[in-house]
Image (cartoon, rainbow, N blue to C red):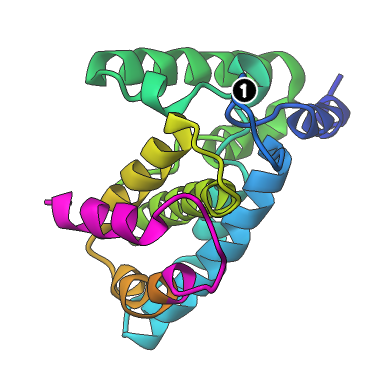
Amino acid sequence: MGIHYYFRSLNELERIFRCPGKFKFEEHSVAAHSWKVVQYAKTLADIEERNGTLVNWKKLYEITSSHDYGEIFIGDIKTPVKHASRELRSLIQQVEEGMIDRFIEEHIPEEFKSIFHQQLREGKDESTEGLILEVADKLDQVYEAFAELRRGNTEKEFIEMYRHALIKIKNIDLHCVDYFLAHILPDMVNDEIVSTVDIRRITEEALASAK
């Protein structure tokens, strides 16, 4: 069916919702998440460049805009489940990558297959762009969980999502992480919103527990 089939499949990302099965004040689709990750990443990359880091912008946009395309095939798997063990995470990634590869081989014209394999690959690695993607992805988890916590949602999963994402971000060695911790996160925590959840305490405990 060609590239038309790929374009049409993108609609499915609008119908896959994150954190399935949990009460939420706000629903977030995978499509919305992907768009926000691109926005976070480009600002994070700007911060890196201001500190002298070279950024491959083409690679950054490719991996951030497509990083969750595989969820069309496997859905959104809850973070605690996905990261329950290294072995499980590896198996999930193998299944996702295998289904993406099969999709490309079955539907993408031969002259574009190598491009799609490159663009839809797992983008999180130790490169600057891969680390920025990791931070941006976790940053959206922080904001999604924060939005629930500030409205009094006491579902344990959102507290764990917020903690896990903050710890992961703090342990990544980038200039943009330093900026986030010094300037952005304090603005979040100091936001004058009355909540039944002690977000400041959760934040301080998470940062203190980061290695």
Q: Is residue 179 above or below residue 207?
A: below
Asked if residue 179 can be seen in this view, the reply is: yes
List x then y, in percent, for residue 31.
72, 41
What is the crowding at mark 1: few (fewer than 14 residues within 10 Å), some, or many (at least 20)? few
**With respect to residue 15, does 144 lie above or below?**
below
**SS class, disc 1:** loop
- The quarter holding residue 114 reads top right
At horizontal 32% and vertical 19% (from top left) the residue drawn is 90
| Residue 154 on image: x %, y % | 49, 37
Count of all numbered marks drawn on residues in the image: 1
Position of 26 relative to 94 (above/below): below
Please state which of residues 148 and 3 is positioned toward the viewer in this rendering.
148
Q: Which residues are magenta?
A: 187-211
Q: Amino acid at mark 1?
A: Pro
In the rendered image, residue 189 lying in the magenta stretch gets the answer yes
Please state the horizontal and vertical placement of residue 2, each as a whole percent of the image.
Answer: 83, 25
Is residue 62 covered in magenta? no
Query: Residue at point 48% right, 24% down?
Result: 78
Q: Position of residue 100 (x, y in %)?
A: 59, 21
Pointer 1 residue: 20
